[in-house]
Amino acid sequence: MSVTHARFSLSPQEAILMLITLFWGATFLAVQYAVTMSGPLFFVGLRFATAAVAVAVVSWRCLRGMTWLEVKAGVVIGIAIACGYSLQTWGLTSISSSKSAFITAMYVPLVPLLQWLCLRRMPSLMSWIGIALAFAGLVLLAGPEGSSLHLGHGEIITLVGAVAIAAEIILISTWAGKVDIRRVTVVQLATASVLAFAATVPTGEAIPATLPPGLVGVAVGLGIFSAIIQVTMNWAQRSVSPTRATVIYTGEPVWAGIFGRMAGERLPLLAVAGAALIVCGVIVSEIKLKKRRSLDIATEEH
């Protein structure tokens, strides 16, 4: 006879990833403020240039041993980062921070699907249930009224960026256990910065003649934060699967909604219900089902 037992487990890596989502939620308002002083691509380039320099200064001794695999991994991940963050920042010029957080979090259902199609890794049952709950919660967080989602120009751009972020998570997990974390992080941040700066030319984005102190402050702050985040993600996802990491990351729009409320944005009742479903999705995804075979003790009467 088989009995199914539910066991909740939370590793240190998963706990740190949950903490990351809190800080991520606060960045949407900061980025939205920054793009009032600069074009989105220039800001992304400045942000990741700061991040690359920060990691390089701390890790300069180990950079000499960089391998071709680490360069390749860093460049590919950097391309995904540049696409994801540039499109997300561009979208923030025309939509609210809470709406951007919701659409960005669409990478939740995209990761297991891309993982299944590209890596042939089938997510577990509890991961699928957690993703379904999180996705239902994200639907409730959709529009300003929490009941509808209208996809305009900014929304579509942000949605395409979500696909790139999903690819980033999968790529990090693919190479996490094969490369040096710090060397790859420097390459991927530098790649993202160069691509963002280069993209200002074909798009015709104007470069600020002078750098406002507020723009520099946000770029440096988010740059250092991005450096810490990328190193942490590369470290944590050595032992956390892409699906489990993705569901944990769904806490991001919840915190974005909370910080948006503190900044004066109203969080509708349905949006609160959506946030609760997202939290439930995170918890359910952390439950592991184990089958234990019970022993039947038979007694014979003689």
Image (cartoon, helix red, strand yellow):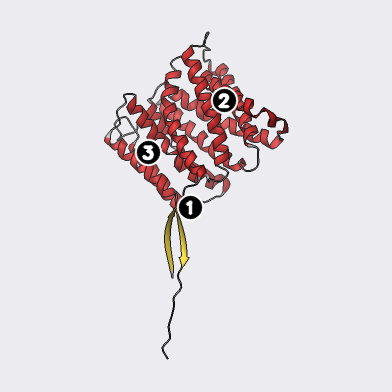
Q: Earlier in the sequence, mark 2 or mark 1?
A: 2
Residue marked by disc 2: 51
Three-letter code, disc 2? Ala
Rendering quarter of residue 281? top left
In the image: residue 242, left or right of residue 92: right
Q: Residue at x 48, y 20 (%)?
A: 218
Q: Which residue is drawn at 53% across and 24% down?
A: 223
Mark 2 vs mark 3, foreground winner is 2
In the image: residue 51, left or right of residue 256: right
- In the rendered image, the residue lying farthest to the left is 269
Q: Residue at x 59, y 28 (%)?
A: 189
Three-letter code, disc 1? Ser
Residue marked by disc 1: 124
Three-letter code, disc 3? Leu
Instruction: Give neighbour class at mark 1: few <14, some 14-19, many 20+ (Cα, 10 Å).
Output: some
Q: Earlier in the sequence, mark 1 or mark 3?
A: 1
The residue tagged with tag 1: helix, strand or loop? loop
Residue marked by disc 3: 138
Q: For the residues marked 2 and 1, what is the alpha-carbon distance in whole angstroms?
A: 35 Å
